[in-house]
Image (cartoon, rainbow, N blue to C red):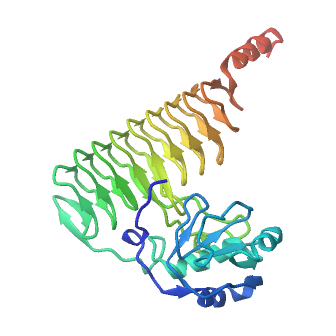
Amino acid sequence: MIKFSRVDFFPKRNELDINLIKNLILDIIVDINFKLNFMIEDISSLELIRDNSVIFTESILSLNHYNQENICLITSKEDVFKFYNDKYSIILVNDINKAYKIISNNLFFHDDDLEFYDEFKNINGSYISNYSEISDNVQIGKNCTIGRGVKISKGSIIKNNVVLKNCIISNNVTICDNTTIGSTGFGFDLKDMGSDNILPQIGIVYIDDNVHIGANCTIDRAKIDITYIGKNSMIDNLVHIAHNVYIGNNACIAAQSGISGSTKIGNNLIVGGQSGFAGHILIGDNVIVAAKSGVTKNINSNSTIAGFPAIDIKEWKKNIIRNKKNGH
């Protein structure tokens, strides 16, 4: 997991300790057990646990190698609360999404917040944040917006009308016209929808070396950690990659494809045009996806798949022949 400094992108709003967090979510607390009071500096996922942080979890995992004195768990599952009750500071709530929204909004400013601030300078027709870091030999086209915390490394080319925010761009990356990277992930609760209730997305996008991203693409930042595009990957025009997606090295994704949130993909992926991936699935290495496929489940390495729902391409072809014989 690639580490980054969250406050480079999302400035700290308030200093919070455990007792203040308790007061912020008092109306949704069911039970609580504090070992000791400490300052909360960040929010962690289960993949990357940071010191002095809050972790929102609905599952029981081994956390024995983490410092028990400066982590606070928040859950809405009674069995999780009981399991960790003697080990960690933990809060049982009746609405974990509401707890996450309240705490993250009080801890950080983010760009879905009216009070989020940035300062820009106009350089050759593009607006570039004073808080960004851009190598000297980066080419930036006209009418781009480059926001707070963005880092762009040497040899990269940013074409016209590109929006970059909440992202790190590595060496020799090309981003084509009208693409947006670091936009808000689709974080919401079906029981409490609307723009006032968006779950804050306080992660980033990391584009690794030598990646080419086509025109009119959108890559959403992660909820807490990173959305990642691996080295040497080629992304065609009109592709959407959702929050928390991880794509390994040497991916090739054709136009009008979409990858839903929290999908994890290995190396050497090849995707035909107009394909779609469901969220929270695992795709192995060396997978080929035929055009117009719908990938709805985990796929093993070295697979070639097609159709909807996508299955092994040989079986898919047999089904087509079988259906034709039956007059379909």
Residue drawn at x 60%, y 29% is 292
Q: Position of residue 170 (x, y in %)?
A: 32, 49
Residue drawn at x 41%, y 36% is 233
Residue 58 falls in image quadrant: bottom right
Assign the C terminus to one quadrant of the image: top right
* Residue reaching furthest to the front: 65
* Residue reaching furthest to the top: 325
Q: Position of residue 117 (x, y in %)?
A: 36, 77
Closer-to-camera residue (127/16): 16
Q: Position of residue 289 (x, y in %)?
A: 58, 28
Residue drawn at x 78%, y 73% is 81
Closer-to-camera residue (196/110): 110
Residue 305 falls in image quadrant: top right
Q: Is residue 130 left or right of residue 86?
A: left
Compared with 35, 259 (above or below) is: above
Q: Is residue 130 left or right of residue 248?
A: left
Residue drawn at x 52%, y 58% is 222
